[in-house]
Image (tube, helix red, strand yellow):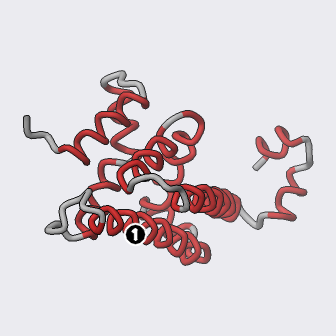
Amino acid sequence: MEEIATRVGIAKGTVYLHFASKEALVAALVTRDMELFLEEFEGLLASEQTARAKLEALLKSMYTGLRRKRIQFLSSVTNGRDIRCLLPEHSNRIHELWMQLASKAAGILEEGKAAGEFKVTLPTKTMLVALFSLSSAHVLERLSLEDDIPPEEFVRYRETIFFDGIIA
């Protein structure tokens, strides 16, 4: 909190006037970022692109540039059990926002099934879990740190695996 106050140029006590604790500050950041991301996602949903193009745009948006760092943070917060325990009063809102994102992504998958882009024999929930699993910030971080794979290249590999599979 002291570092934040110093960077902003205010007293530490002023930060505590707005946020009761470090956890409340983290929850506010997570909530704000998720709300902003969902707003951007709405614009993508309204586009005239194919379902695949929408998902590709979503994944590129999530995992390139500055957004990548924020998504890694959001993913670790929303998926980390310890964080959820630290933020119980905020976990309902964060979970609600996550479910909105999952619902919208499932809608794109359903749209793709209806248009013949995606296999109708695969349950949408299974496709959604696979998509989010391949999109895990932990996976991106591990690959980019250990194998020195640039995020843009990782995005292309992930899209290939998700959309085309691994069979030659």
Q: Crowding near pointer 1: few (<14 within 10 Å), some, many (20+)?
A: some
What residue is rendered at 47% in x and 50% in y? Answer: 58
Q: What's the residue at 25%, 47% (across, down)?
A: 163
Direction top: furthest residue: 148
Q: Is residue 79 left or right of residue 123?
A: right
Q: Up-down: is 24 above or below 141?
A: below
Above or below, 32 against 87 in this view is above
- Specify whether residue 76 is in view: no
Name the residue tied to disc 1: 107
Where is residue 139? Give x, y as percent.
33, 42
Task: Pick the residue in front: 5 or 156.
Answer: 156
Q: Is residue 37 left or right of residue 58?
A: right
106 above or below 149?
below
Residue displayed at 18% across by 61% down: 119
SS type, badge 1: helix
Image height of 61 relative to 149, above or below: below
